[in-house]
Image (cartoon, rainbow, N blue to C red):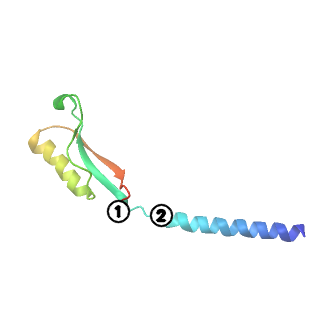
Amino acid sequence: MRRSFTLVCLSGLLIGISIGCKAAATVDTSSAGKQYRAVCSEKAMHGGNEQVLSRWLDEKDKAVALGEYHSNFKDKGHRWRLEERAKPVSN
C-alpha cells in the first residue's frame, strides 16, 4: 500500500516537473510586450530635471531616433538614455 502511494506521488512530481520545464522553455523574449522612451540625462541644462524626449512608444527604433535627434541636432552633445517598461494591459 505504501509502495503504490509513493509511486503515485513520485509520478505526479515528475509530471509536474516536466510540465514546468516545458512552460519555462516557451517563454517569449521578444519585445512585443515592451515600450520605450528617450530621456535626456543633462539635468542642469533642463532646469534641474531630466527631460523626457518622447512618449512611451512600441517601436524601439523611433525612441532611439528621437534621442539621437536631441543629442545631435537640437541640443548638441547632450547625453540621453533609453528607458524600457512592460506594456500596460488595456481593458
The residue carrying pointer 2 sits among few (fewer than 14), some (14 to 19) or many (20 or more) residues within 10 Å by Cα, namely few
The vertical placement of 18 against 34, above or below, is below
Amino acid type at mark 1? Ala
The residue carrying pointer 1 sits among few (fewer than 14), some (14 to 19) or many (20 or more) residues within 10 Å by Cα, namely few
Q: CA distance from mark 2 to mark 1?
A: 12 Å
Q: Residue at x 72, y 68 (%)?
A: 12
75 left or right, relative to 58: left
Q: Position of residue 79 (x, y in %)?
A: 21, 38
Mark carried by residue 32: 1
Q: Residue at x 53, y 63 (%)?
A: 24
Amino acid type at mark 2? Val
Mark carried by residue 49: none
19 left or right, relative to 83: right
49 left or right, relative to 22: left
Q: Earlier in the sequence, mark 2 or mark 1?
A: 2
* Secondary element type, mark 1: helix
Quarter of image, res 51: top left
Q: Residue at x 28, y 58 (%)?
A: 58
The vertical placement of 86 against 8, above or below, is above
Residue beneath disc 2: 27
Q: Residue at x 38, y 62 (%)?
A: 30
